[in-house]
Amino acid sequence: MSRLDSMLRRLTAQRDGLNWAAAQISGMDGDVLDMGLGNGRTYDHLRETLPDRRIWVIDRVLQCHPSCIPPEQDFLQGEARPMLKQLAAEGHKIALAHYDFGFGVKEKDVAEATALSSAIAKVMTPGGVIVSGQPLTGFDELSGPQDIPPGRYMFYRSG
């Protein structure tokens, strides 16, 4: 499979997974969290899909497309662990989280996701849904949409 075809499959799975997760949390209280703003495509999709939810964004740097800059009060710039601790300390509860942090080195990415899992759990609303490009620990794994191949994206429910 070409890298272009692989990227298209990943982006389609990401979009379909986020849409599925948004439907799963309808009727549930809580905010949305996008971990890893990048160029802002996912954030843009989340704000279009869930216009009535507050969307928090965590990233080390703000370098997204100008049309995708989150409101200043919703952008938490810095390392993920202190930003997640800040959200938890302020009492914010997340109904849907999207995890997309990464260095581009699989072993390093998996280790970081594992290390951050407990901090993510502390901000989640019970029964909230997490969509992740990396395996997380301490959550109930969900099947997710049937048309997304296993392992392409992971889906979890918080306890």
Image (tube, rainbow, N blue to C red):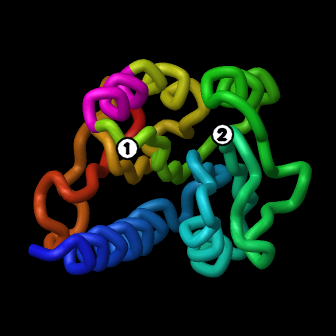
For the record, the magenta segment spans: 106-114
Quadrant of the frame with the C terminus: top left
Q: Which residue is mark 1?
A: 104
Q: Residues within 10 Å of mark 2 (few under 14, many from 20)?
A: some
Instruction: Name the residue: 39% across, 30% down.
Output: 113
The residue carrying mark 2 is 93
Picture coordinates of residue 58 (x, y %)?
Answer: 67, 43
Look at the picture and state if 104 lies above or below 91.
below
- The amino acid sitting under disc 1 is Gly
Q: Main secondary structure of the magenta part?
A: helix
Q: Describe residue 114's horizontal placement relative to residue 51 as left or right.
A: left
Q: Viewed as shown, does residue 13 lie left or right of 69?
A: left
Q: Nearer the viewer, mark 2 or mark 1?
A: 1
> How many numbered discs, if any?
2
SS for dot 1: loop
The quadrant the N terminus occupies is bottom left
Answer yes or no: do the residues labelled 2 and 1 have beta carbons within 8 Å? no
Q: Amino acid at mark 2?
A: Lys
Percent x, y for residue 61?
A: 73, 45
In the image, residue 148 lies at what x, y percent?
A: 18, 69
- At a point 71% along the width and 50% down the height, the residue shown is 56
Task: Choose the circle earlier in sequence order: 2 or 1.
Answer: 2
Is residue 134 shown to the viewer in this render? yes
Q: Nearer the viewer, residue 24 or 83?
A: 83
Q: Badge 1: few (under 14), some or many (20 or more) residues near its Cα, within 10 Å? A: few
The residue that appears at 81% across and 28% down in the rendered structure is 90
Residue 37 drawn above or below residue 81: below
Q: Left or right: 114 with respect to 56?
A: left
Q: Position of residue 65 (x, y in %)?
A: 71, 72
**Mark 2 vs mark 1, CA separation in Å:** 29 Å
Q: Nearer the viewer, residue 64 or 43?
A: 64
